[in-house]
Amino acid sequence: MKMMITGGAGFVGSHVVKRLQGDHDILIVDSLHPYYSPGWKQRRLNSMAGYKNIQWRKVDICSQEALEALYASFQPDCVIHLAAIPGVQPSLEDPAAYVDADVKGTVNLLSLAAKYQTSRFVFASSSSVYGTDVAGPSREDEELQPVSPYAAAKAAGEMFCRTYQRLYHLPITIVRPFTVYGPEQRPDMALWKFAMKIYHGEPITVYKGRIGRDYTYVNDIADGIAKAALLPAARNRTYNLGNGKVVPIQDLVLEIENALERKAMIEWRDLPLGDVPMTWADTTRAEQELGFRAMVPITEGIRRFADWFLQEGVKR
């Protein structure tokens, strides 16, 4: 199968490429966006240089002309669309940028997939689309209540996906990853920031209240995305990809302390605007239809992250 993977040089995207390489012809499309160091993404691409049947092109998905030329040349059977500007707090500062990259870029790809009759389109949404009202595990058929421009952009992307599905009978699968973590993760995420500050003896900011996340190891997320792209039963379905467990923020800090063998100094603050207190995935549908189950427990995942952080991450 010929697969186009947008954002394939990113944290999650590079793991999806590695999960699928060897069995498929893969075209990585990535603009090396400077949200964080493009050098990190280039190193990931360099590490995949030896894999067979993989190529990459530096193309911005907002550039319709360049994207169509590439699409027409490669003619993908499947598109796995992971490219996006991430981050809740930065989206409050520049919401228009998220409309451009996360909405318009998605529409560009959907239009090409419809035009060239692509047989599968997988869209990576986000657990943030569920919003703040999380009394129990979030289910795929719940009303979406985004509370940040980033979350709204992802929800809009989902709406466009369903519209193109109805208009053009485009087979679409939506996945909603929950708080992905692991070695090589983005430096703006809580785990990375906590580890860096704890390592250097600096205070960390922890938000007050009942705060927790459904932390899901990146390899598990990559496996779920690959299954969503390959299994016929996944067409026109939406799936939560998570561990199905909430890790309270205090427990996360304790895990990092144990893995780094250092104590944290904590500064307590109120939850900022746009952030959500909790994420929690109901993974029943993904388990039953995809055979998906997160395999890496939080203690093991944090240990793997810490091993990488102490060897490489702290130098970056």
Image (spheres, grey):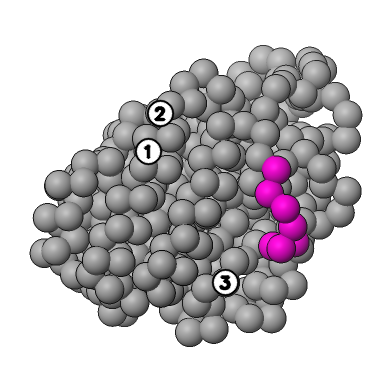
Q: Residue at x 19, y 61 (%)?
A: 71
The residue to which callout 1 is attached is 101
For the residues labelled 1 and 2, the Cα–Cα distance comes to: 6 Å
- Give the amino acid at mark 2: Ala
Question: Horizontally, is 134 left or right of 303 in the view?
Answer: right
Question: Horizontally, is 100 left or right of 287 in the view?
Answer: left
For the residues labelled 1 and 3, the Cα–Cα distance comes to: 24 Å
Q: Position of residue 33 (x, y in %)?
A: 32, 34
Task: Tell me if label 1 and label 2 are in contact, CB under 8 Å.
Answer: yes
Magenta span includes 161: no
User: On residue 97, which mark appears?
Assistant: 2
Neighbour class for label 3 at 10 Å: few (<14), some, many (≥20)?
Answer: some
Q: How many marks?
A: 3
Question: Horizontally, is 146 left or right of 102 in the view?
Answer: right
Q: Position of residue 61 (x, y in %)?
A: 28, 45
Q: Residue at x 80, y 50 (%)?
A: 246
The residue to which callout 3 is attached is 237
Neighbour class for label 1 at 10 Å: few (<14), some, many (≥20)?
Answer: some
| Above-or-below relation of 110 to 286 | above
Q: Quadrant of residue 35?
A: top left
Is the stretch drawn in magenta largely helix, strand or loop?
A: loop
Question: Horizontally, is 259 left or right of 227 in the view?
Answer: right
Tag 2's secondary structure? helix
